[in-house]
Image: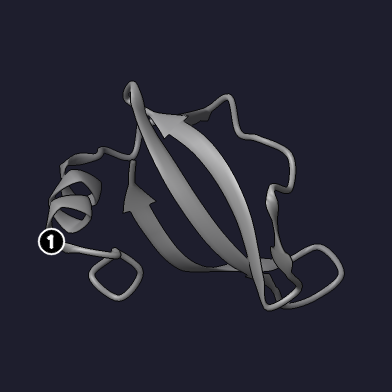
Amino acid sequence: MKAVANNQDTYIFLRSLSSKDRVNDTSDFQGGSDENAYYVTVVKNQDLNVYMRKTGIASWEIRRVEKQ
């Protein structure tokens, strides 16, 4: 988590999540490129910016997460 958290506050939030927490209201593609696609999602009533990279036909890698 530390590798993808944009800052200490985001890292602490990600560490506080349990395996039962789920994302909600994930946006459609908001911009960027294949190497840095941008999405917004909600976890535990917290908006998160998520930057991902497509690594295969149906697989993605999370590159960065930041709290809004």
**Residue 11 in view in this figure:** yes
Q: Is residue 30 left or right of residue 67?
A: right
Look at 26% across and 38% down and name the residue there: 18
**Can residue 22 be spotted in the picture?**
no
Compared with 54, 67 (above or below) is above
Residue 35, percent across and down?
68, 78
Q: Is residue 38 left or right of residue 58?
A: left
Image position of 43 with respect to 19: above or below: above
Q: From the viewer's perspective, tell me whether residue 11 is left or right of residue 36.
A: left
Rendering quarter of residue 22: top left
Placement of the N terminus among the 4 image quadrants:
bottom left
Amino acid type at circle 1 is Gln
Residue 28 at x, y percent in the picture: 73, 39
Q: What's the residue at 43%, 66% (across, down)?
A: 64
Residue to which mark 1 is pinned: 8
Give residue 41's position: percent from left, percent from top: 51, 36
Tell me how many marks there are: 1
- Residue found at the far right of this picture: 57
